[in-house]
Amino acid sequence: MLKSGKMAVENMDCRIGIKYLCENSVSLVLTDPPYFIDGMGADWDTKKLKSRVKNGVIGSLPVGMKFDSKQGHDLQNFLAPIAEQWMKVICPGGFCLVFSQNRLVHRTAISLEDAGFEIRDVLLWKYEGQPKAFTQEHFIKKRNVPDDEKERLIRKLDGRKTPQLKPQGEMIVLGQAPREGTFVDNYDKWETGLIDVKNPFVERDQFPGTVIPVKKPRQRNGHMTEKPVDLLRHLIRIFSAPQSLVLDPFAGSGSTGVAAKLEEREFIGYEIETEMAARAQHRIKGTWA
């Protein structure tokens, strides 16, 4: 059982909440921040997004297909000062695992690196997604041109679609705070900086790898981008020690907190949406380690 049992989701902006945490108090940051695509940015509003989403489509485009050169810059400008806050509260040698939309992962990595984290690796959560590329035949048929011109274009395109391959994974940037001294000395003092590979939660008979196959969750608990608890347990088990504190600044429906409780870690999360924060608190309270 947990020593102090600290399990909390605060209904507030993480940029405010983290200021109240003590230095060197967090062993692991594990989070899924806004990706700054298709309205999923600093102004994230679950109700508004749900009203626009149908079968993986937002508006008239598949999720993630609304390209804008500002997206990467907006993500980095948002995440960089928050990563600096993480650096102030994480223990020496502590790990930081941040989910990222694949085509913006470089911005996530830069944000962590500029804050002082060492980029150790990029992991891949492997799953089977649904193809989201669009054929162009429908748009051609709507053109105000003669039918023979439409037929010519359809033949020329020969079934080609928008440039989006079938999604089969999502990247997770692995950063590490600088250690104090050697790996041994750092772990002896802070119980951070080394990984536990003895009993991985996923593929238990194998040495943990950078590709982690876990099915998408069937129940999303009201959250559009919920991550599977089994995946989060796997990461928590490897990158933190029992009874240590796990931080999720973008707690959503509380999956990281559920995983932390099941793995006998302490947890602090922040969620800016009141309804979602209440859902997260309820889920975590109903979980038994």
Image (spheres, grey):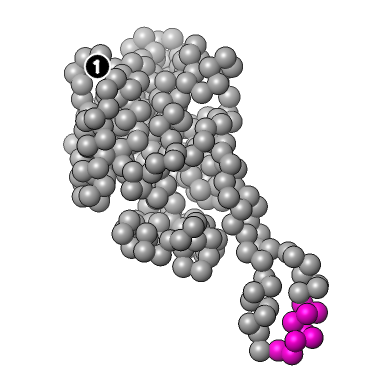
Residue situated furthest front in the rendering = 218
Residue found at x 39% / y 14%? 186
Task: Give the dominant element type of the magenta stretch: helix, strand or loop.
Answer: helix
Q: Mark 1 is on which residue type?
A: Leu
- Residue 259 lies in what quarter of the image? top left
The vertical placement of 14 against 176, above or below, is below
Q: Badge 1: few (under 14), some or many (20 or more) residues near its Cα, within 10 Å?
A: some
Which residue is identified by label 1? Answer: 2
Judge whether residue 105 is colored magenta.
no
The segment highlighted magenta reads 145-153
Q: Quadrant of the N terminus?
A: top left
* Residue 186 placement, left or right of 13: right
Tell me where residue 271 appears, x and y as whole percent: 26, 45
Image x and y of residue 137, in percent: 69, 73
Note whether 18 is above or below 160 in the view shown.
above
Residue 253 visible from this viewpoint:
yes
Q: Nearer the viewer, residue 48 or 187?
A: 48
Q: Residue 237, relative to residue 130: is it above or below?
A: above
Tell whether 181 sits left or right of 288: right
Seen at 63% across and 64% down, the residue is: 134
Q: Residue at x 49, y 61 (%)?
A: 57
Residue 23 vs residue 169, the one in the foreground:
169
Q: Position of residue 188 (x, y in %)?
A: 36, 9
**Residue 229 % position (x, y):** 40, 32
From the viewer's perspective, tell me whether residue 262 is left or right of residue 277.
right
Residue 69 visible in the displayed image? no
Where disc 1 sits, the SS reads loop
Where the C terminus falls, by quadrant? Answer: top left
